[in-house]
Image (spheres, rainbow, N blue to C red):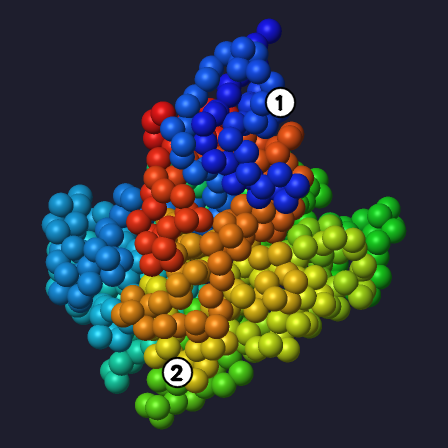
Amino acid sequence: MLFDALYTNGTFYTQDGSRPRVHSVGVHNGRIISLDDELPQSLFRDIHDMGGAAVVPGFNDAHCHLSYVGQALVQVDVRPSACPTMDELLDAVDRTCRNAPAGAWVQGAGYDQNYLGNQHPTAEQLDAVSHGRPVWLMHNSRHMGVANTAAFERAGYPDRRSVPSPEGGAAPVDASGRAVGLLQETARALVMDAIPAPTVEDVATMVGAGSAALLKLGITSITEPGLGAPQHIGHTMSDIAGYQAARDAGLLGVRATVMPYLTTLHGLDSNPGQTGQHDDGPKRLGLDLGIRTGFGDQWLRLGPTKILSDGSLIGRSAFMCCDYHLDAAEGHDNRGLLQFPAEDLRERIIGAHRAGWQVATHAIGDAALDVVMDIFEEAQQLYPRQDVRHRIEHVNVAGDEQIRRMASLNLIPVPQGRFINELGDGATRALGPERVALTYRVKAFLDAGIEVPASTDAPVVSADPLLNIHDLVNRRTASGADFGPAERISVAQAVRAYTVGSAYAAREDHYKGSLSHGMLADFVALSEDLYQVAPDRISDVRPTVTVVGGQLAAGSL
């Protein structure tokens, strides 16, 4: 019998401290069985020459909306890179609406008002180019969006009148009382609920399209944060069935850890006399049959349950300790808002913790961070668990004392380095230059002894891992301004975050994240040695070959 494949003549940066570099990796049944010359070439069926390339474990994006990456490929692209001005954005909508079937919804995603003169598109502007179609454009933060008049009418609000502002959201109106088009946070559901829901097959198609795009970037694993609650996040209540359908059809090329949104969980103590769990504390929350974090396999598994505590930094809805700089300068008092009342957050997070879930709570503002840490601390005091690894997604603004507390509570921050470039200028305007030092921090987490993952929040920003690493190392905004240079990290730290750190954050580090015996054979070859190029050239490095489970998934050898 021959083993499957030997990948040789490369410089493999293993991320295993006991053996940091090797030149050959032997693979069988999707796992690494040998390093260097431990087994002779004659024992392998296929020999692949890596041509001297630098190789790292497959990039693992710890917070990536894979299905939305795929969805964006079939919608109007209104990202700043495609539509850098308002006129170009409206032209793109015009072209799509003109060619869309009569009455069909036209959707787009990725616009950023910071690139549009600090203005969101309005309903009236979209009306002028919609050709009678209902239009919905999602902001790049995915915490807000803009609808035209036809969309409001489909949602039951003729002439954009009598549009409510639900708890945890806002629907601004003009002087005449008509909605201007912008819907923030929970108010998005006012229009989004009227958009026909995708089918399971539609979600599978999105997953497949996103998966193919990410493999080309060298990404072999992702965690999708939040599915199954379209009024908050996700496409339909059957999102995970869409993932399963993608896998069944051979479309799921990356390994996916998926987070059900916390509102999809329900009480598990309907018969307290039988469970013995009844008391006055928050009730246990779970999915049907009590399944929880860890259910699944190496290709598709349940990760943490996800919940949002606040909003967006550049959208100025993240919950802050102090007023936003731009709003304060214009005479507006605005510190953002919580998505749920604090007591509701407490009941949900502690209930999930009690039922054995790993919990991932979105907290962007520093005030939201304090609320969330208080809840996690209480959860562990009430119902102690070992090695829980609860996560706080984003942590965009954090002080030194907050980071020390996060480390003491064994919480995992999940930052996005690419935010520095694509969103940094907008964050500076939102917070003011004096608070930038507390924004998009990474080195401070590492210095506190925290194992930090790497992620992008794509399609909020680019999913490209090399661009993300470039920004973690260089920390410059799109305008070229330095952004918290004291938080720069090394290439070695960034690669570890993208591999070991992301596997740790998903509780998968026992089989993923490093190239060593028994680990999954997921790796990516690069056009240049990432560890040797000048820092300002990191973004020039490209993936050339992506291998998943020992098999070629993208590129060519």
**Residue type at the position of mark 2:** Pro
**Residue type at the position of mark 1:** Glu
Q: Is residue 251 above or below residue 224?
A: above
Residue shown at the point (62%, 56%) measured from the top left: 451
Residue tagged by mark 2? 433
Mark 1 against mark 2, which lies toward the viewer? 1
> In what element is the residue under mark 1?
loop
Out of 503 and 41, give the one closest to the viewer: 41
Q: Is residue 447 visible?
A: yes
Residue 378: % across, % down: 75, 68
User: CA separation, marks 1 and 2?
Assistant: 55 Å
Q: Quadrant of the N terminus?
A: top right
Residue shown at the point (40%, 66%) measured from the top left: 475
Q: Count of labels shown?
A: 2
Residue 514: % across, % down: 58, 40
Residue tagged by mark 1? 38
Q: Is residue 468 above or below residue 394?
A: above
Q: Quadrant of the C terminus?
A: top left
N-terminal of the pair, mark 1 or mark 2, is 1
Out of 555 and 525, give the one closest to the viewer: 525
Q: Residue furthest top?
A: 1
Residue shown at the point (13%, 58%) measured from the top left: 91
> In what element is the residue under mark 2?
helix
Quarter of the view holding residue 114 = bottom left
Dot 1 crowding, Cα within 10 Å, few <14, some 14–19, many 20+: few
